[in-house]
């Protein structure tokens, strides 16, 4: 099992779905976890971690607000002394065909999914550079690689995370910091829960392994990239999609 004892993680969008699975997996591997979400939604996840004997701090932040992010990072640094791992998971969707998409829906998705990741990365870089080690992992999507009908904003934001991560990886590689991307396919989360049974069946048939993935499938990939075993991996995109995109 991957050992993250002594490590401190900062996970955004950690109240549910993939973010929750990542936070719980990190804690199970021995890491202390900053469970970040809006409006104290991460409190139950932090409580679950501490009830199991782990260490966690629930943090309320809006990734779009750089000041909010810096305050949350400061809180984790004060509580745990450092930040070793950042997982940029916070994300939203505002689906619509491009010709009908409102500017506000374009801007909101790019602000949360892409600018939010920049805000968080910028906030943790100084302490990571000072300690000469760190892991930054952003959760993209298969649609950031393949595109998808009605998701020009979401696909652009998720593709942007890939370019952002590759560029940042080049900037910080000599400082002992790796920067990678995990690109999930169809995962059983709140975001996919609204898909009808017939559509889900059709989509599953297009996935070589024949099913949707679970949040823990993604969490295991993130946990690996956060580990010492992945120290020579940077600037890469790890697809967790059952073969949906090759």
Image: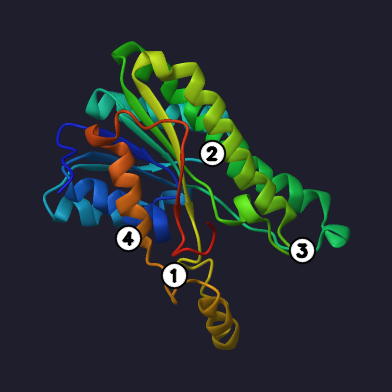
| Distance between mark 2 and mark 3 Cα atoms | 23 Å
Dot 2 falls on a residue whose secondary structure is loop
First in sequence: mark 4 vs mark 1: 1
Left or right: 153 in relation to 181: right
Q: Residue at x 41, y 30 (%)?
A: 234
Q: Where residue 229 appears, x then y in whole percent?
A: 23, 35
Asked whether the residues under the numbered discs 2 and 3 touch, taking CB atoms below 8 Å apart as contact, a structural biologist would say no
First in sequence: mark 4 vs mark 3: 3
Q: Nearer the viewer, residue 46 or 27?
A: 27
Q: Residue at x 60, y 34 (%)?
A: 163
Dot 4 falls on a residue whose secondary structure is helix
- Report how many numbered discs are placed on residues in the image: 4
| Res 96 label | 3
Query: Which residue corresponds to mark 1?
Result: 188
Mark 2 or 3: the one toward you: 3
Mark 2 or 4: the one toward you: 4
Query: Which residue corresponds to mark 2?
Result: 63
Q: Where residue 241 appears, x then y in whole percent?
A: 46, 61
Query: Which residue corresponds to mark 4?
Result: 216
Mark 4 or 3: the one toward you: 4
Asked if 79 appears above or below 51 in the picture, the reply is above
| Distance between mark 1 and mark 2 Cα atoms | 24 Å
């Amino acid at each position: 099992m991957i050992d993250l004892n002594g490590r401190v993680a900062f996970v955004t969008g950690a109240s549910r779905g993939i973010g929750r699975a990542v936070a719980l997996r990190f804690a199970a591997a021995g890491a202390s976890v900053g469970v970040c979400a809006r409006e104290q939604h991460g409190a139950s996840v932090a409580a679950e971690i501490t009830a199991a004997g782990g260490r966690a701090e629930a943090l309320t932040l809006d990734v779009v607000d750089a000041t909010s992010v810096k305050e949350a990072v400061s809180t984790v640094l004060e509580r745990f002394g450092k930040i070793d791992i950042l997982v940029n998971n916070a994300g939203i969707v505002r689906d619509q065909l491009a010709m009908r998409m409102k500017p506000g829906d374009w801007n909101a998705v790019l602000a949360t999914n892409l600018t939010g990741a920049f805000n968080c990365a910028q906030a943790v870089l100084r302490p990571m550079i000072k300690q000469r080690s760190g892991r930054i992992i952003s959760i993209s999507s298969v649609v950031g690689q393949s595109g998808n009908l009605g998701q020009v904003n979401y696909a652009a934001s998720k593709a942007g995370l890939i370019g952002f991560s590759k560029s940042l990886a080049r900037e910080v590689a000599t400082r002992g910091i790796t920067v990678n991307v995990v690109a999930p396919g169809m995962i059983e989360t709140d975001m996919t829960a609204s898909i009808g049974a017939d559509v889900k069946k059709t989509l599953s048939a297009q996935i070589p392994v024949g099913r949707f993935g679970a949040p823990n499938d993604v969490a295991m990939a993130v946990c690996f990239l956060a580990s010492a075993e992945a120290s020579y991996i940077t600037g890469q995109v790890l697809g967790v999609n059952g073969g949906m995109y090759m």
